[in-house]
Amino acid sequence: MSTDTRADEGGSLLARPLNWLETQSEEVYAYVLLIPAFALLALVAFYPLIETFRFSLLADAVASADPFGEFIGLDNYVDLLTGDTNFTQQFISISTTDSFPFVTFGAPFLQQALFVTLAFAIVSVLFETTIGFGQALVLDQDFYGRRWVRVSIIIPWAIPIVIQGMIFFLLFNPTIGFGTEFMQWLGVFGDNPLSSSTDSFLIVLVADIWKTTAFMALLILAGLQSIDRGLYDVAEVSGASPWQRFRYITLPLVAPALLVAMLFRTMDAMRIYGLIDATAGCETVPSLTCLVIIALQNSRRWATASAVAFLTAVVISGFVVLYLLALRDSEGGVA
Amino acid sequence: MVDRESDHDGGRVGVSRRRFLETTGAAGAAIGLAGCSGGGGGDGPIQITMDSEWQGISDTVSQSLYDAGLDESIEVEILPGDFESGARRSEFTSALDAGRASPDIFMMDSGWTIPFIARGQLVNLSEELSSETVDYVQSDYLESAVSTASDPGSGDLYGLPLFPDYPVMHYRKDLVEEAGYDPEGENWATEPMSWQEFAEIAADVWEQNGGQGGDFDYAFTTQADNYVGLSCCTFNETMTAFGGAYFGDHENLFGPIGDRPITVNEEPVHDTIRMMRSFMEGPDAEYAHPDFPQISTTDLLSFTEEPAREPFTSGNAIFHRNWPYAIPINLDSDSFEQADYDVMPLPYGVEAGEGDYEGTGGPAGALGGWHLTINPNTQRLDECVQVLEAFANEDVMQSNFAEGGYLPPDPSVTESVDPEEVGALGNFLDTLAVAGQNTVPRPVTVAWPDQSPQVASEVSAAYQGEKSPEEAMSDLESSLGDIESDLAQ
């Protein structure tokens, strides 16, 4: 008898919120269901970011068991932005002058992590998008042997980053690689490309373009295939040239997919690390992520590493905002 | 309106779906929580993180420890750490920063033990080991190895040197003899020659074999890449041989930070760079030393240990600077016979004692090597101490030498060892003994992790001829000074 009562009480305790839920609209119910996911997402995404920012406001303590020292406010950021850290590679190191061009580099351009990363991201995404677009246009056609072309385009994307890094490392290895001699014959590289910032930057750039163009091609191809073929028929009947068909049908309709693909690629390119580590090394081509690793692992400067990581997040989110603005416009245009 | 309707409908239909979600959600949470309560500790073996090669001989290592008197109830497990020293440092840094109790014992590089000591993250062995053992280590072990395992301030011992490592010059005896030299008669194995003499011999032997573009790509290979090995080792030892130093007298190697001279922008250091420029690009190149011939190429700029060794092992180089690990590999080479191969101590720049600073001049080889240290968070300190006591034993050192080729940290053991028992290394004991007497440790302090990349990067820039030796060393002087004043206590 008493057991029954308790079971009833338990049932009604559970039933009350459930019944309340039953009376809510589908929209409210959806949000209730989404709360745990949002909470988890906030925990996973924002907690580390906030903690990183908090760490970055503390001093480095290289000589004590606790890696963080006292609160020093924005000093770490000031050191990073004025090129005044103890690292060989700086986040950014420029100073202003009185005469044209009014700025001078404290360290060579390609030894400053921010410029290396920005230059890499912009140039690589530009080339990958252009070449990827070309490949997607070819793949969008019907022709004999299309399967094989698709496979051959996707192969570089299937190679693990470290293996790919090793390929390029060995190509330019002085004892066994033939890449250096070939590039010297073209008059492009010096004697030791993997020790020179400029040459190594180009090597990493080409390696990345070779690998990731396939990714762009596939995403753009998906966009191309969603375009209604009837539009082209109409255009052809109306006498539009191939260029006009591209300009007024393909480009505007593929733009949202293109921008999303570029957004992914830019975010990815801004985080470049593995390819550099496997080819020239972070000393030669210091990207932003390289600088985080150098600060964290070589110097055990956790606070400075946190500051670099946070600045990296800021730079990347700046790019994301630009893309989101462009995407909003393009969607408006399409609609 | 239509929307409202369908919403409402959806709500009704969704009753069972909602109940389902609620039930499965609760069940999932319960299972998740149950998963958290698993795990736990136990009385396992004492764990030592070493590397995969030590792990490969772990049975004989354990047996030799028991033979040396370790209680057989203490089981020792050797874990394979990362192959690369820097990666292992990061692994240990995070283990100690997080206060983890495992592993109980670390195998730490002599190049980065002191920062852990300075941070108070290791057990003070002077307080834990028996006074006999501490005395034995401090009086009989290789002094420069012990100094990289001790607190520079108090002199207390925090690491037990496991094995030291010092470089030798590997060379092709057959080619040298064919060229008219007499290594045996002139005692190359134990009497170091000068860099000048060495370079001229190397250039001559190379020339007789066709020189550049001839039978051999290089007369000499060493490591000159922009990496940690340049600052700790190859540049450090060559500069020391010429009488130069990073921080003046060698008593300043381990501090005091901020209160020691910075002596990189001086003539012996400039000369070292000029000599290396001549080796790579010839005496007529910019910033090269006119007295030294060309004996290699700029490929050296991208060589670390293995890339520098490969041309030698494959019969493409005549002389090669490397650690003793390369001896067994070279003896196995398909390109030359064992009898055609020998080693000798590294050359000197100026005579011993003629250097500008105490401890400099004479032949110098960088000191590498590894120590055993105890994790202060271990729950079984007594057993860890017993394991370390057992390692400080001559028979254990001999066994490690014979099984793994690890040099004994007590030089008298190296001298008394039976050449028959230690296999490949047995023929080269005399050279190793001489090399062991002429080692220079790297200047490890809490500032060194910041300073080392600065040294490597400036020296590399000077080697490449991007900067003059004076300009590079002046830049280095100021950046080392900045770090010193930044970290001065």
Image: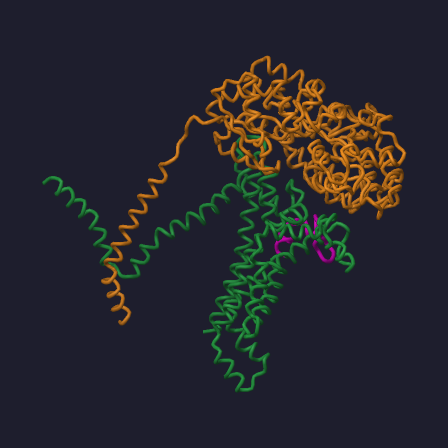
Residue A76 in picture, x, y percent from top left: 58, 42
* Image: A286 above or below B202: below
- Nearest the viewer among A15 and A322 is A15
Residue positioned most to the bottom = A238
- Position of A96 with respect to A37 (left or right) is right
Q: Quadrant of residue B395?
A: top right
- Nearest the viewer among A85 and B378 is B378
Tell me the green chain.
Answer: A
Q: Quadrant of residue A215?
A: bottom right
Residue positioned most to the top = B132
Tell me the orange chain.
Answer: B
Residue A96 visible from this viewpoint: no
User: Which range is magenta?
Assistant: A92-118
- Nearest the viewer among A91 and B125 is B125
Q: Residue at x 24, y 62 (%)?
A: B13
* Image: B293 above or below B421: below
Q: Residue at x 78, y 43 (%)?
A: B316
Residue A104 is inside the magenta segment: yes
Residue A126 in picture, x, y percent from top left: 61, 63
